Amino acid sequence: MNQQITPESTGVEKKLRILSGIQPSGTPTLGNYIGAMRNWKLLADEYDCLYMIADLHSITVRQDPSKLRQQSIQLFALLLAIGLDPEKNVLFFQSHVPQHTQLSWVLNCFTYMGEMSRMTQFKDKSAKHSDNINCGLFTYPVLMASDILLYQANLVPVGADQTQHLEICRDIATRFNGIYGNVFTVPEGYYPKFGARVMSLQDPARKMSKSDPDDCFISMLDSADNIRRKIKRAVTDSDAEIRFDPENKPGVSNLLAIQSALTGDSLDSVVSSYEGKGYGVLKSTLTDVIINTLSPIQNEFNRYMNDRAYLENVWRNGADHASYLANKTLSKVMKKVGFIAK
Ligand code: TYM
């Protein structure tokens, strides 16, 4: 009888799996890049990675269809532009893999109203969009749990604002496993050491967000002139000392943290490089760092946007691959809960 070949039996160690996603609800910001996307690229060799455009999530807030389409394609091109190799990473659109919504229904039945009501994102978004507090917004974390659990992900690289969603995903998985046996891998969050929460340039008490007014964030597709203007206008404070002190000097500390995250230099060395210098120098140096980071990505982005056939090919392959993996988990779940096989 043929012995089944598995990575273990060949002595090749099986890589741990990663799943993460980003919503196409605008052009991604420097916060998205530093908090998540940059790490996706760094982790790509070591792990078995799936990265998706979370388009199903984005309609929990009303979207203009043509804008949504354009932003989705741009975001997909950006995944490639930051250096994610589609031969090594599964890149796909969430809406191309129907198993996400199928699992989501099942998991909805294992999640409590009280748990969802406590989610800060639900509270924030329902306050911001009080005319559209829809059920999708309420059960958003269940869909996100389904995204992760479908692929048996071990690790989920995200920014700090997703901590609560990761926790509820772990709770749902543990609950389900407690009833039906070990169906799901219980995932861990992976947060960057620096830059897990990049703050708004105009209100450094809040996180940088693509849904805020334009001068609050740097978009990954901003021109050099825009970047220069936005950093110049970034809120600092009236005392002229450059030191890292998020509580008393949130604006300056945010700029220092961005520089540290993008250059890989420690905060201490970034701070000491400004000894005896003023905010003007900090801002112009940081502007150069940001432009130098984003301009090669933007060049690649333009190249991919000019090759629609290639993009389509990558997303179709990504959807097929993701669907294949998702089906394995979904079939197991269907069987466990007592549905009849086709
Ligand atoms: P989204 O689209 O809001 O953001 C994408 C990623 O960027 C991170 N991020 C930040 N990191 C640091 N500083 C900031 N200012 C900042 N703003 C955003 C987010 O933490 C996130 O990692 N629910 C998710 C999308 C999602 C998902 C998933 C993620 C859907 N399914 C499954 C992981 C696994 C979201 O809205 O991300």
Image: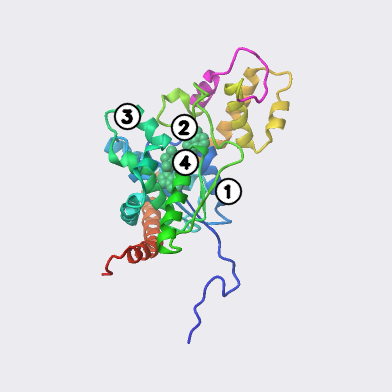
Mark 3: which secondary structure? Answer: loop
Comparing labels 3 and 2, the label whose residue is closer to the camera: 3
Q: As shown in the figure, which amino acid type bears the numbered disc 3? A: His
- Image quadrant containing the C terminus: bottom left
In this view, the residue in front, 334 or 80, is 334
Rendered image: mark on residue 129: 3
One can see residue 155 in this view: yes
As drawn, is 316 to the left or to the right of 249? left
Residue 119 x %, y %: 41, 38
What residue sits right under mark 4 in the picture? Answer: 164
Q: CA distance from mark 1 to mark 3?
A: 35 Å
Q: Does the residue tagged 2 have its C-beta within 8 Å of any atom of ligand 1?
A: no
Comparing labels 1 and 4, the label whose residue is closer to the camera: 4
* Callout 2–callout 1 Cβ contact below 8 Å: no
Rendered image: mark on residue 251: none
What residue sits right under mark 1 in the picture? Answer: 42
What residue sits right under mark 2 in the picture? Answer: 219
Range drawn in magenta: 226-246
Q: As shown in the figure, which amino acid type bears the numbered disc 1? A: Leu
- Badge 1 or badge 3: first in the primary sequence: 1
Residue 239 x %, y %: 64, 13
